[in-house]
Amino acid sequence: MNGVSTDTPLVGKLALIGTGLIGGSIARAARASGAVKGIVATARSAETRRRVVELGFADQVTETNAEAVKDADLVIVSIPVGASGTVAREIGPHLKPGAIVSDVGSVKASVVRDMAPFIPEGVHFIPAHPVAGTENSGPDSGFAELFVNRWCILTPVENGDEAATEKLKAFWEALGAKVQTMTPEHHDLVLAITSHLPHLIAYTIVGTANELGEVTESEVLNFSAGGFRDFTRIAASDPTMWRDVFLHNKDAVLEMLGTFNEDLAKLTRAIRRGDGEALFEHFTRTRAIRRGIVTIGQDSAAPDFGRKHAPLPGAPIARPYAMDED
Amino acid sequence: MNGVSTDTPLVGKLALIGTGLIGGSIARAARASGAVKGIVATARSAETRRRVVELGFADQVTETNAEAVKDADLVIVSIPVGASGTVAREIGPHLKPGAIVSDVGSVKASVVRDMAPFIPEGVHFIPAHPVAGTENSGPDSGFAELFVNRWCILTPVENGDEAATEKLKAFWEALGAKVQTMTPEHHDLVLAITSHLPHLIAYTIVGTANELGEVTESEVLNFSAGGFRDFTRIAASDPTMWRDVFLHNKDAVLEMLGTFNEDLAKLTRAIRRGDGEALFEHFTRTRAIRRGIVTIGQDSAAPDFGRKHAPLPGAPIARPYAMDED
């Protein structure tokens, strides 16, 4: 155990349904921060459950969701959003009165719609979305620092239990996150532009590059450092998770897509007409946004995301740059 | 001097016209690798020239392009491609017989068209494009390791001097690059998909996010870790350079854009119709491309580009992950 707090943990028993990148990171961070007394975890496949036992980031691994939530003070469902309703139906009858049920889904309105009907009176249902991740998935991919300095959005119901919301907020803060509250509908609109549309665009262009007759796949790979490779990271995200995101946040994604298409048409027209001034003006404006993100600490100021560079062939290491091998 | 080679340098006098990210990195790498005997550099603005003198990565800084290329064995023009013709006209009469003239432009057919007419008989004109960079620009932004393990594309003329091409190839290899040869037209098609279209898309979506009425700018910045922030890096690239790229590679960019738009329409239709199978199939296919790029060493295998994570609040450093502050 890496726990450092000697105070009473914030949460007694934490139940994690789903142990992929997010669930597995919550477990590691909850333990390392001393925020919970004990962790019980479960996963759909027997193989994953075996792996979780090996990795040891939970105190107990159960075979069923119903078993996992028994006596739990905080239940966090960390699965593709399309399965939220099914899981809520399974765990509903087994939840302890006074428990908090939350999730980590990238869509919130559909999660509320699908889960809320199965949460019994006396249990506090507070949907959540930690805006953090990597392109990896599965129980091996998580790590305790994933949520540090990232935002976690809570979408509590109006007139819900304030103490429960405060407790969930304190839990995420113990994991290093900053917490903000908004409605599920507003969340879905905000994430459509900051996350869902970027993923859709990345998935599209990587697919486009993969299908060209005139440019070979090895050319696409070799010369990807010109910009393309940045998109491939996002387009390597978990297919099941992202299928569900697009199916469950359809309206907001289509709305943002409409605006994006208009803007792309404008830039296309500027290229076609040779309107250098319009291009220059646009490119200057977008540069400022990067600075804003770096200033508030949501990305590194290091060039190229801080990607490492190998040293020059035969040269001594004599510069202040990171030079580990790629 | 960091030079380690005690052999005769590959190149005697290297003249650099333009000392931004690429020119400045060439200077630092050429010196560190011992590939050149001496470096003379110049830049359009007096302020940049002063800064280059301060930074000290050239042995001599001249006020004019004509002066810089005098007696140079290798001239590399590292400026926005729109200025290629003007610079070629200026330096043409001052080039030494037997010298090699090259460039680093992201477009090749237009550079050949604009520069070749001004290169005198007896001087070897070999256009080049090192596929490497960061979002930063200016003389301070360069570093010696920028080209290590990256590709440099040469587009020599048919029946050109083979020894000169070999020499330029050896120069780029001394800087750590891998070298491939192709026609200017094929280069422009390949780069349209691996670099120019990704930049256009990134510039577009960052602009879209910046103009939404329903989502505030601070929400866009705060929740950018959901994917959006990846696009802001590319959309922070030098506006003048990129204006020129789009104006000078119009046809190939518009062609790739056509294919991209068709693919985006297909995915949009799948979302609208709730066709989860089509989405899942597409997202699974694109995941493989990332693996290909990592396998050939064109990107890091580290999750999230190896972005650093701050430690948990109050937790001891007990994990193998990079944990420097952002």
Image: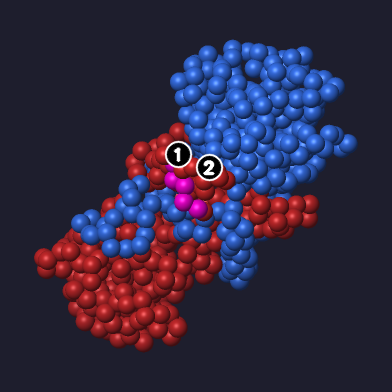
Chain colours: A blue, B red
Q: Which residue is mark 1?
A: B318
- Distance between the alpha carbons at the discs numbered 1 and 2: 8 Å
Q: Looking at the image, do the residues carrying marks 1 and 2 touch, with CB atoms under 8 Å apart?
A: yes
For label 2, the crowd category at 10 Å Cα-Cα, with few meaning under 14, some 14 to 19 and many 20 or more, is some
Q: Which residue, given by chain and number where applicable, does mark 2 sit on?
A: B315
Mark 1 residue element: loop
**Image coords of residue A262 (percent x, y):** 70, 53
The residue sitting at 39% across, 66% down in the picture is B142
Label 2 marks a residue whose chain is: B
Residue type beneath disc 2: Ala
In-image side of B60 versus B301 (left or right): left
The crowd level at tag 1 (other Cα within 10 Å; few <14, some 14-19, many 20+) is few
From the top left corner, tell me how far across and down residue A161 is, in percent.
84, 34
Taking depth in this image into account, of B276 and B313 the one nearest to the observer is B313
Helix, strand or loop for the magenta stretch, by majority = loop
- The image shows residue A50 at horizontal and vertical percentages of 49, 16
Residue B323, magenta (yes or no)? yes
Magenta segment range? B321-325
Q: Residue at x 55, y 61 (%)?
A: B236
Question: Is residue B218 at all visible to an observer of this figure?
Answer: yes
